Amino acid sequence: MASRTPIIAGNWKMNNTIKETKELLTALIPLVKDAKCEVAVCAPYTSIAAAAGLIAGTKIKLGAENVHWADKGAFTGEISADMLKELGVEYVIVGHSERRQYFGETDATVNKRAKAALSRGLKPIICVGELLGERESGATDDVVIRQTKGAFDGIAADELKNIVIAYEPVWAIGTGKTATADDADATIAVIRGVVGELYGKDAADAMRIQYGGSMNAKNVAELMAKPNIDGGLIGGASLKAEDFAKLIAGVN
Ligand code: PGA
């Protein structure tokens, strides 16, 4: 099996002013200097430039939380891949469940955003995951298969190395409820199977797939012990330097 470098990415969501960004990153940088995994922070647009300056020359990579699919133009309130690239952004979250739930994101728009990101040399973190009702009705696999196929539509095999998938069961996000490590691993195996179906076994083995949803310093080791889980997309536990650093220290 291909060896995959785990990636822990903080998803700050609509948190952290520039001032708070400075406080958080100043505290975080020394705490994660010996991290064994890749570390990224995905910041709100207004804090990206400040974050870029603070993390330059450190282990921490820069991410954004969304990107529009068009190069430029009349899309009031949107941000293009070139704009992010200019700020030094490397990763960008695409299709987070909060975008799907509150902002009309669909499998088709997730696909368009992922392709735009890739075309400009950004690395999309593509989010998939089922709602509580879908889990309870046994539809989890169908949902993540549909979302994964939709997200990868038309993406060439040579782009795969620049993609991370995040499996985030929606009912586990910000709720304190984590999927059991076995359930998360099993669903991620299904997602990996889709990558295999689309691009072959080697591609599936090489694809990094994170877990997200109430991941924290206490449950990280159990989740990371599973063969299919290659890191995490972290909301709440990425907002305090000590919490995030402890979580990262738990990745082996
Ligand atoms: P959470 O958020 O860690 O607060 O559950 C994860 C996410 O939404 O990416």
Image (cartoon, grey):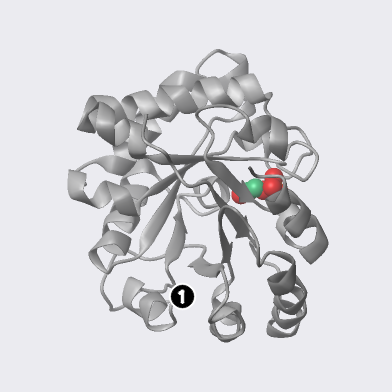
Q: Is residue 15 visible to us here? A: yes
Q: Is residue 240 visible to us here? A: no
| 214 over 137 or under it: above or below | below
| 250 over 19 or under it: above or below | above
Which element type, helix, strand or loop, lies under badge 1?
loop
**Residue at the (61%, 36%) spot, across then down:** 170
**Residue at the (36%, 35%) spot, across then down:** 2
Horizontal side of 177 relative to 57 (left or right) equals right
Which residue carries the number 1 mark? Answer: 77
Which quadrant would the C terminus be assigned to in this image?
Answer: top right
The amino acid type, in three-letter code, at marker 1 is: Gly
Quadrant of the rendered structure where residue 28 is? bottom right
Give the image location of residue 161, x and y in percent.
Answer: 31, 50
**Circle 1 crowding by C-alpha within 10 Å: few under 14, some 14–19, many from 20:** few
Horizontal side of 223 relative to 23 (left or right) equals left
Quadrant of the rendered structure where residue 205 is? top left
**Residue at the (39%, 29%) spot, across then down:** 192
Quadrant of the rendered structure where residue 218 is? top right
